[in-house]
Amino acid sequence: MSDPIDMTKEFSTGSICDESGRYCCKSHTYIEQFINKDDEFPKCQKANCGRTEWYKIMIEPKRPA
């Protein structure tokens, strides 16, 4: 993953997403998931992780050539 992560706000499994976007697991930042606005944050896909906190992955603006 090369995009920066916003670590200023955590979203718990089961809480409602307030902004659609890409999120990653706090413990396994290589596990990414797209979450739609108003959907619940899921459990981590890693077998022994389960409930977790999620961080939003920020999209870098494209720079003009």
Image (cartoon, grey):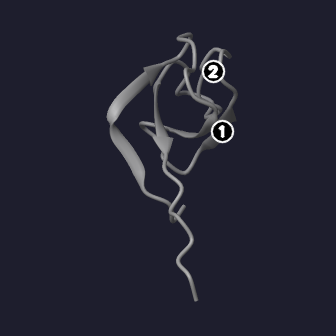
Q: Which residue is mark 1?
A: 33
Looking at the image, is mark 2 or mark 1 earlier in the sequence?
A: 1
**In front: 12, or 45?**
12
Residue lying at 57% horizontally and 20% vertically, measured from the top left: 17
Residue 43 percent coordinates (x, y): 60, 21
Callout 2, which amino acid?
Pro
As drawn, is 43 to the left or to the right of 6? right
* Residue 14 sits above or below residue 8 on the image: above
Give the side of residue 41 with respect to residue 27, left or right. Answer: right
Q: Quadrant of residue 55?
A: top left
Q: Position of residue 13 (x, y in %)?
A: 53, 16
Q: Determine whether the residue tagged by mark 2 lies in a helix, strand or loop.
A: loop
Quadrant of res 45: top right
- Which numbered tag is attached to residue 42? 2
Residue found farthest to the left: 8
Which quarter of the picture shows residue 53? top left
In the image, what residue occupies the spot 52% across and 27% down? 49
**Crowd rating for badge 1 (residues with CA inside 10 Å; few <14, some 14–19, many 20+):** some
Where 53 sits versus 2, above or below? Answer: above
Q: Residue 59's x, y, as percent?
A: 54, 55
Can residue 25 be seen here? yes
As rendered, which of 44 and 58 lies closer to the eye?
58
Q: Are marks 2 and 1 in contact (CB under 8 Å)?
A: yes
- Where 57 falls versus 42 (above or below)? below
Name the residue at 66% across, 38% down: 33
Q: Does residue 52 lie above or below 23 as drawn?
A: above
Q: Amino acid at mark 1?
A: Gln
Q: Is residue 28 visible from the viewing direction of this image?
A: no
Taking the spot 33% from the left edge, 40% from the top edge, the residue there is 7
Residue situated furthest front in the rendering: 64
Q: Quadrant of the N terminus?
A: bottom right
